[in-house]
Image (cartoon, helix red, strand yellow):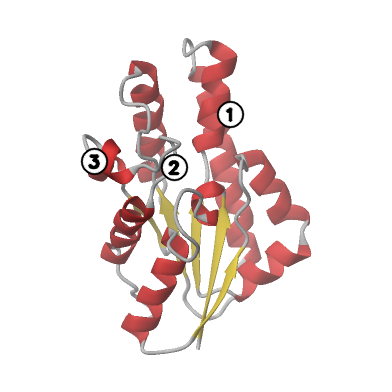
Amino acid sequence: MYRYTAIGDSLTVGTGAPPGKGFAPLYLRSIERYSGSRVLYRNLGVKGMTCPELLRNMTSSLVYRNALAQADMITISIGGNDLIRIAQSTGGKNIGPGMLQLQQCLCQTLAVLYSIKASSRAPFLIRFVGLYNPFPEVAEAAVGIRSFNAFLSSMNAPYFRVAHTYSSFKGRERQLLSSDRVHPNGRGYRVIAAQLDKLGFYPLF
């Protein structure tokens, strides 16, 4: 039996899709299918969550820490709300300082996660959902999101891999986004889940 814990923002919640059609429950079914085993699932996603808020929960919440300590698979979706706040506070100009703070938060988040997993004797997987661009008409949005994804790709840690979604959504926003034009619809979440599947499940099975 395996344990899967999903943490993060509204993407982890599955906002924009029918119940049970977000990427996390879809990924859960993939884990069960490929492993041939039952999987215990915890979804701790919170709409509107930012990286500092996630970091605070991971540091101080026993619910988070216990769920992560026991998990064999962990998915993280965070950063989109942070980028929106950075853009709003700067008017899309000079986003460098805000991006640096976000990068530092991402590093701290991974560091706390690995400290939680330090006593784990079994291998575990950490999968980070990279960002797509829901605002293709805004040039500054593309710059910030590409910078965020590039930083994610540069992070090197055991069992850590990034599910890249940017190119899968580019030019297909009408088909893959929900009516709010920000969150994926059911089809969009299937695309995200497929990118997670491509990363495989080694060394778990």
Instruction: Judge whether 79 appears above or below 100 on screen.
Output: below
State the SS at label 1: helix
Asked if residue 77 lies left or right of residue 153, the reply is right
Q: Toward which corner of the image does residue 117 lie, by quadrant?
A: bottom right
Give percent across and percent down for residue 59: 73, 54
Q: Nearer the viewer, mark 3 or mark 2?
A: 2
Q: Earlier in the sequence, mark 1 or mark 2?
A: 1
Q: Alpha-carbon distance for marks 1 and 2?
A: 24 Å
Q: Earlier in the sequence, mark 3 or mark 2?
A: 3
- The residue labelled by disc 1 is 101
Instruction: Judge whether 131 appears above or below 116 on screen.
Output: above
Q: Nearer the viewer, residue 27 or 64?
A: 27
Q: Nearer the viewer, residue 60 or 176?
A: 176
Residue shown at the point (77%, 59%) measured from the top left: 61
- The residue labelled by disc 2 is 183
**Crowd rating for badge 2 (residues with CA inside 10 Å; few <14, some 14–19, many 20+):** many
Residue shown at the point (61%, 46%) measured from the top left: 47
Instruction: Judge whether 28 appears above or below 104 on screen.
Output: below
Q: Earlier in the sequence, mark 1 or mark 3?
A: 1
- The residue labelled by disc 3 is 167
**Crowd rating for badge 1 (residues with CA inside 10 Å; few <14, some 14–19, many 20+):** some
